[in-house]
Image (tube, rainbow, N blue to C red):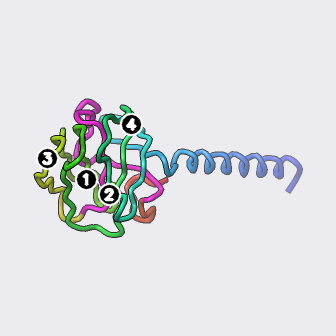
Amino acid sequence: MGKCGKFVGIVLAAVFAMGSAAAQAACRADQVHLGGDWGQARFVVEVADDRAERNRGLMFRESLPQSAGMLFVYDRPGRISFWMKNTLIPLDIIFLDRTGTVVNIHANAEPLSTAQIFGGKRIQYVLEINGGLASRLGVTEGSVLRHPALDQSRAAWKC
């Protein structure tokens, strides 16, 4: 291979590495990306991936920044339900399957309610955001979520 061929190979390798780095940077533990036919949105999230964090959730908070939320991560898909006991702000609760695909949206969950909010049978991830925001953005069932906590071999939108 001549000097020109080596140079092109090095440049292509550098471009590929930069593209991979950009893709990695787009997938951060403190952010989720939600997308669909309606467009895309990014939320800064706290991740609740153990029993104690999931049980506490967003309880006792008086506000939530507009572009913030909480991502609940379960070890495996299952029957997931929530309630709003001790939760002071209305929330949209977005239930996702193991691929990160939205299968159910409970809009404007009532603060302080002890009524069970059933998300579905094969739920593995749940995203909570400010009440009414999912509708304003146009988030629908079939939308997909990107986050490094998802099993990337199954993720509908990979990191």
Q: Position of residue 45 (x, y in %)?
A: 42, 45
Quarter of the figure that contains the N terminus = bottom right
Q: Is residue 108 above or below residue 9?
A: above
Label number found at residue 95: 1
The disc, 2 or 4, on the residue closer to the chain's N-terminal end is 4
Mark 4–mark 3 Cα distance, whole angstroms, equals: 28 Å
Q: SS for tag 3?
A: loop
Q: Amino acid at mark 1?
A: Phe
Q: Secondary structure at mark 4?
A: strand
- Of the numbered discs 1 and 3, the one sitting upstream in the chain is 1
Q: Nearer the viewer, mark 2 or mark 4?
A: 2
Which residue carries the number 4 mark? 41
Q: Nearer the viewer, residue 48 or 40?
A: 48
Q: Amino acid at mark 3?
A: Ser
- Observer-side mark, 1 or 3, equals 3
Q: Quadrant of residue 129?
A: top left
- Secondary element at tag 1: strand
Which label sits on residue 125?
2
Helix, strand, or loop for circle 2?
A: strand
Circles 2 and 3, Cβ within 8 Å, touching? The answer is: no
Please tell me whether mark 4 or mark 3 is closer to you in this view: 3
Q: Is residue 120 left or right of residue 30?
A: left
User: Which residue does the numbered mark 3 point to in the structure image?
Assistant: 113
Which numbered circle lies on residue 158? Answer: none
Left or right of 8? Residue 52 is left
The amino acid marked with disc number 2 is: Tyr
Q: Amino acid at mark 4?
A: Ala
Magenta segment range?
123-149
Answer few, some or many: residues within 10 Å of disc 3's Cα (few below 14, many 20 plus, some between 14 and 19): some
Residue 116, horizontal then vertical, whole percent: 13, 55
